[in-house]
Image (cartoon, coloured by chain):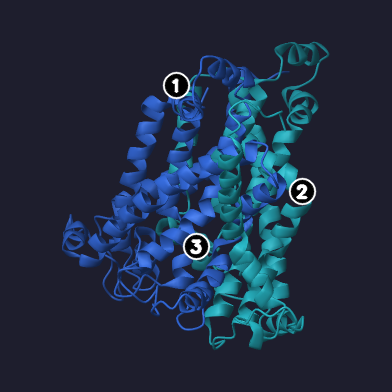
Amino acid sequence: MRLPDRVTAWLLLLPALVLLVAFTHAPALATVWDSFWSTPKKGRPSRFNGVDNYRSMVEDEVFWKALWNNLIYAVGTIPLSIALAIAMALWVNSRIVGRGFLRLAYFTPTVLPMIAVANIWLFFYTPQYGLLEQITQGLGLASHNWLGDKRTVLGALIVVAVWKEAGFFMIFYLAALQQIPPALAEAAALEGASRWQYFRRILFPLLMPTTLFVLINALINSVRMVDHLFVMTRGGPDNASTLLLYYIYQVGFSFWDTGYAAALTVVVLAVLGVVAFVQLGFLDRRTHYQ
Amino acid sequence: MTPTTTVFRPAAPARVLETAAAWLLGLLWILPLAYAVWTAFHPAAFSTRFELGAPLTLQNFANAWSAAPFARYFLNTTLLVTMVLAAQLVLGTLAAYALARFEFPGRDLVFVLILLQLMVMPDVLVVENYRTMNALGLRDTIVAIGLPYFASAFGIFLLRQTFKTVPKELVDAARVEGASALQVLLKVYVPLARPVYLAYALVSVSYHWNNFLWPLIITNSVETRPLTVGLQVFSSTDQGVDWSIITAATLMTSAPLLLGFLLFQRQFVQSFMRAGIR
């Protein structure tokens, strides 16, 4: 005897749904709930404290610093890595000398663990005997502690993030470029378009769905990519390089203030929620999700 | 690779300039790795002195290997990525099959709920998931590292898109011959999706090999720590500033993925492309 289709379907979905609900939907809702409760301490169980956690958040300078840093981190990383990714894809897709090597070089950072390469970058930036110092000294420039200076630390981390991401995004552009029929370029050339016009008026609009897809990924990564902080800066100096997720880790697992960590997580969820809404709401039909 | 067009090839001077720019970027991109290789394979005295005649050595690797239980970390990571991949493939296949093949009330809603995980990843929900693992008594186990990732929205999505392209005639033919729903899945859908499975496997393995924050939080002992966390513990506990040993450990940690990537470069790149086109 055959089961009705809808029973079969639900049975097939069940294992995945149980785990998804248990580790995504339920914790997301629980985070919101817990953000209204105090952190349980010895002899003092958790109690409902309304918006107290949020009130302390508004007064918490480190939170604002982390939020602001994260904004700069996103703005510094996303456009640059997308622009580089497009350039890389165009080069690797053309008849350039050493195409194989270039593709390899661009893509390699993607497969390396961030926590591992952070060690290499830390050595790069080390004062006195790091590679960067050797170069600047060779050029006769003043010594500079890139990760120890509040003004340069975030920039130094952005460089690492761009380096890690650009080659990953290149792949998506490369895939998209290979879908574009060469006849378009020939037609544009016949019409007397310049190379720039061809890129600006034909290629770039055709790559738009890819750009939107990459943009969403880049936005998520700017929230998620904090591994290198653990090795390179630990959020310092003076919280100059702390990012939201790193701060959540600190609050939740160094200070063990889980109620407050939940409130901070709600902020991150809200940001991601907006991104999700934008994507599902109106990018959906025009991009990849068909 | 598809043939690339020769139209809009820039004139010779511009072309040279562009090639130079592309190469400069390529060298910059490979520089950190090249630098690490130099430091790891030379004695500490040469870690920032670049001389052609510098003696080569494997001592840094030997020192790193004996200074921390890397063998155990390798085992833990291998167990972790295998377990996660196996679970993701099985659960993802079943769920994708349900979404692609069957009509049932609530299907679109379920699909949207699944896609939500693309945004709200377990990586962000560490505080609550830690609590859950604690309640389940799973803290500091390898299963706990993998469990939140067993059901992967990305995997389900990718397989659903692939399954939707399977011709209905094939399915109907199998049904006429009396195949059950599960047999149709195993005999018709799964074989046709083989390249997608490979693509997804490469993406998943490299993701979980590299994952750090959640394993750092949920593990607390040598027996469970994956390589990434082991490396961090190793390089942050008092090694002085012996960069040669740290870079050797760093390279060791990345080596399997890097070697896999070098050997299967084409598949790797194409897998990521396939995973991205959707």
Q: Is residue A24 above or below residue B175?
A: below
Q: CA distance from mark 3 to mark 1?
A: 34 Å
The answer to whether residue B78 is left or right of residue B153 is: right
Image quarter of residue B198: top right
- Mark 3 belongs to chain: B
* Residue underneath mark 2: B264
Label of residue A285 in the image:
1
* Residue underneath mark 3: B213
Q: Nearer the viewer, residue A96 or B26?
A: A96
Tell me the SS state at disc 3: helix
Q: Residue at x 68, y 71 (%)?
A: B37
Tell me the SS state at disc 2: loop
- Mark 2 belongs to chain: B
- Mark 1 belongs to chain: A
Residue A11 visible in image:
no
Tell which chain the image draws in blue.
A
Q: Position of residue B42 (x, y in %)?
A: 71, 81
* Mark closest to the chain's N terminus, 2 or 3: 3
